[in-house]
């Protein structure tokens, strides 16, 4: 019985370590300042970033310094 549990646990650990979806989590950060054509910063502007492969979008609003 102990051997069955050992093989089962070993198999689950092996699957967990070799499954690429478990390790495929990524994070990123985008930063910058929004300016108009005259170079003035634009507070309160909605900025949207889209991941082209998945179509997932993230939206943020600039602060008082345009960041």
Image (cartoon, rainbow, N blue to C red):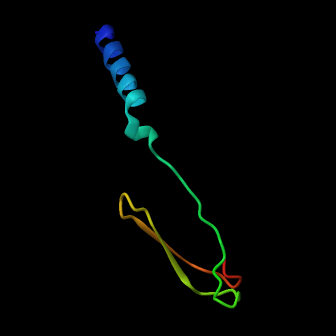
Please tell me how many numbered marks the rendered image carries: 0
| Quarter where residue 61 is shown | bottom right
| Quarter where residue 21 is shown | top left
Q: Residue at x 64, y 89 (%)?
A: 37
Q: Residue at x 36, y 13 (%)?
A: 6
Measured from the top left, where is residue 26 in percent x and y? 50, 49
- Which of the image's four quarters has the C terminus? bottom right
Q: Residue at x 42, y 28 (%)?
A: 17
Measured from the top left, where is residue 2 in percent x and y? 33, 9
- Which of the image's four quarters has the N terminus? top left
Instruction: Note whether 23 is above or below 55 in the view shown.
Output: above
Position of residue 51 in the picture relative to residue 46 (left or right): left
Measured from the top left, where is residue 14 in percent x and y? 38, 23
Front residue of 34/1: it is 34
Instruction: Note whether 19 is above or below 32 in the view shown.
Output: above
Front residue of 18/38: it is 38
Front residue of 21/31: it is 31
Q: Residue at x 67, y 81 (%)?
A: 66
């Amino acid at each position: 019985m102990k051997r069955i549990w050992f093989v089962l646990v070993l198999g689950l650990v092996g699957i967990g370590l070799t499954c690429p979806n478990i390790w495929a989590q990524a994070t990123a950060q985008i930063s910058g300042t929004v300016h108009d054509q005259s170079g003035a910063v634009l507070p309160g502007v909605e900025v949207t970033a889209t991941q082209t492969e998945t179509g997932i979008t993230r939206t943020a609003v600039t602060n008082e310094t345009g960041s």
